[in-house]
Image (spheres, helix red, strand yellow):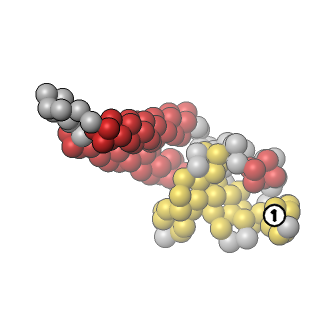
Amino acid sequence: MDKLALKAFLLKIERESIGKAELNYSEYLEEIKHDWSGVEDIEDHSHVIESGEKTFQMESQILDHKKHLEIIDSISFEPMAVVDLGAVVKVNDKFFVVATAEPKFKFEGKTFMGISIGAPIYNLLRGKKVGDEFVFNGKTFKINEVH
């Protein structure tokens, strides 16, 4: 498995996500511009509060992607024999990348999911090698591969 290509792919996903989130945010800010020269009423204030909450959510999304980009960029992704930050792990025929929490994505024809070192399952995976087993949520899992 080409882990450096995987790292480049993850960086690309985050850059694209940042671009999309920033574009959505910019378009949203254009939409919510309000002409305050008219009469204000309770409904105007309600919309301001709602737009502030949505603005905060959109800004947080951009910051999360930027943080993910920094984290992924800082990880070496060198080959590994035990699970640690930067490992690619096949567990019960599912692939995980230990970097940042990411929804499922396809790479080299396989489905992956990103997990962070803060994920509960990571604490059970950390330091394990091929052939090791662990129990998570009452199910037994076996590590098939570590890259």
In which quarter of the view is residue 76 placed? top right
Q: Quadrant of the N terminus?
A: bottom right
Q: Indicate left or right for 119 with 105 as reference.
A: right
Quadrant for residue 147, please give it: bottom right
Count up the numbered dots. 1
In the rendered structure, the answer to whether residue 103 lies left or right of residue 43 reads right
> Could you say where residue 108 lies in the image, as x and y percent from the top left?
48, 65
Q: Residues within 10 Å of mark 1 (few under 14, many from 20)?
A: few
Q: Toward which corner of the image does residue 21 lie, by quadrant?
A: top left
Q: Which is nearer the eye, 85 or 64?
A: 64
Looking at the rendered structure, the kind of residue marked 1 is Asn
Q: List x then y, in percent, for residue 117.
A: 69, 43
Q: Nearer the viewer, residue 13 or 44?
A: 44
Q: Nearer the viewer, residue 109 or 113?
A: 113
Disc 1: which residue:
137
Residue depicted at x 81% and y 63%: 137
Residue 18 on image: x %, y % = 37, 42
Above/below status of 20 relative to 136: above
- Compared with 89, 27 (above or below) is above
Q: Compare residues 113 and 77 and report the one nearer the observer.
A: 113
Q: Residue at x 68, y 58 (%)?
A: 89
Is the residue 67 above or below the residue 11 in the image? above
Q: Residue 24 at x, y = what percent?
A: 29, 46
Q: Residue furthest top?
A: 37
